[in-house]
Image: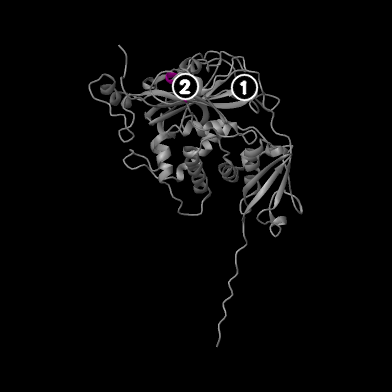
Amino acid sequence: YLTVTIKRSLPMTTFTVSLKWGKTLYDDVQVDTSQPPEVFRAQIFSLTNVPVERQKVMIPGGVLKDDWSKFQKRMKNGMKIMVMGTAAATSVVKPTVETVFLEDLPPEQQLVTTYPPGLKNTGNTCYLNSALQCLRAIPELKQSLKDFTKTNQDQNADLAMALKRLWESLDSAKSSIVPMEFILAMRQLFPQFAGQRGGVFLQQDAEEFFSSLLEALRSIPRIEDGGSGKTAIEQLFTGKFEKKSICTESEDEEERVEEEDFNKLMCHITNATSFLTDGVKASMVEPLEKHSAILGRNAIFERRSKISALPFYLNVQFVRFAWKKGNDTRAKILRPVDFPPTLDVYPFCTEELQSELGPYRRGEKQSECTLSSGNQTGLYDLFAVLTHKGRTADGGHYVAWVKQSEEEDDWLLYDDDKVSPVEDEDIRKLTGKGGGDWHIAYLCFYRSRKGPLLQG
């Protein structure tokens, strides 16, 4: 007997092509047809600055649409692909100061400053770029992702791996990059962020994306010696509320106590809100309707929340977007609200937790302030701010302001792919006093305070 084994070669999916756009020819462009066409379009955007929605990609045999199936047999190395479309406008301003070249400066002035790379906006993705830059400032999260390996087929794990590769690319990149792999994985897991109008992706809410991402990242394992918590996200961001429900219609109704996890504090904004702590205090008391066993009917209860366990990193959301009655649209609340560089949440803690914090706050015990020890003082330092510029909830622009070190005036502004230094004074202007046409704080990111505790 003669046994014949026939080996079928898998179709080739990676090609090196030439890309022609107008009079410009880009050689040695890599195309991977195993990836969605959006990945190739992102490459084109990074080369030509032609936004994805304006691109018309012409391959011998037709125009590239939503998949490669039509061209799978036609693709080959060395082929020429044509791109039509107008590049995004860039403003060119005549310099007001004469250009001085580096080599013409005296030696003491020949200091070259480089900043971390930004993320290119692929079409209303500033909400995503700004949130990722704020989260990237958390070293424990970066390390946890670096150690993460995917062990099963899970979309949450796919997103975590995409974020891991994105941050690794940013660590080695010399210029801004297109986060297309992460965007595709995110939209597949969360289709609510894939909405389009007229073929253009819609602006999304940065806080909704941030909260969704934290939920997805629960797939990454816990940090060794990182304190309590089943996952890294719980160890880093999760605190606990003690919630007491008190019936306002009957003193005989038994007080109900329950515990609830939280990943952020809310700052509710009313006409009486001038400081972040005002809004947080207002959010700690809320009315609710529930059944009263004593009255035998539904009654109004007042639910009062106190913090019973502190997170190591504390996120605070300014509730600036609210639904307008009658027209089903979200409006932006423009009232200015000051936020502190150091936030003290001691007044919002339970009496039991306050008694635990007291010795550290008075200096009777030395605070370690590590992830394993947790926050022992109730004090937090601001390290990042995510802002929104604009007057509407469904438009505008998000950027990130991230502190680089403990030094004064050491902040960077991440405006998509543009990164620039800013000072403490610029951060103090993010309260909303500049109106809707300037950046207003939407999310504040605080880390447990190290160093001196209280002044005086």
Counting from the top left corner in percent of width and height, residue 266 is at 49, 25
Q: Quadrant of residue 382?
A: top left
Q: Is residue 107 above or below residue 140?
A: above
- Residue 375 on the magenta span: no
Residue at x-position 46% and y-position 34%: 136
Q: Which residue occupies the foreground of this view, 352 or 433?
A: 433
In the picture, measured across the screen, residue 47 lies left or right of residue 166, that is right
Q: Secondary structure at mark 2?
A: helix
Q: Which residue occupies the foreground of this view, 239 or 222?
A: 222
Counting from the top left corner in percent of width and height, residue 133 is at 50, 32
Q: Which residue occupies the foreground of this view, 327 or 191?
A: 191
Whichever of labels 1 and 2 marks the residue nearer the N terminus, that label is: 2
Residue denoted by label 2 = 280
**Residue at the extreme top:** 456
Foreground disc of the pair 1, 2: 1
- Residue 111 on the magenta span: yes
Query: What is the three-letter code of the residue carrying label 1?
Result: Lys
Residue at x-position 47% and y-position 33%: 135
Residue denoted by label 1 = 332
Magenta part of the protein: which range? 107-112
Say whether marks 1 and 2 touch (CB < 8 Å): no
Counting from the top left corner in percent of width and height, residue 279 is at 49, 19
Query: What is the three-letter code of the residue carrying label 2?
Result: Val
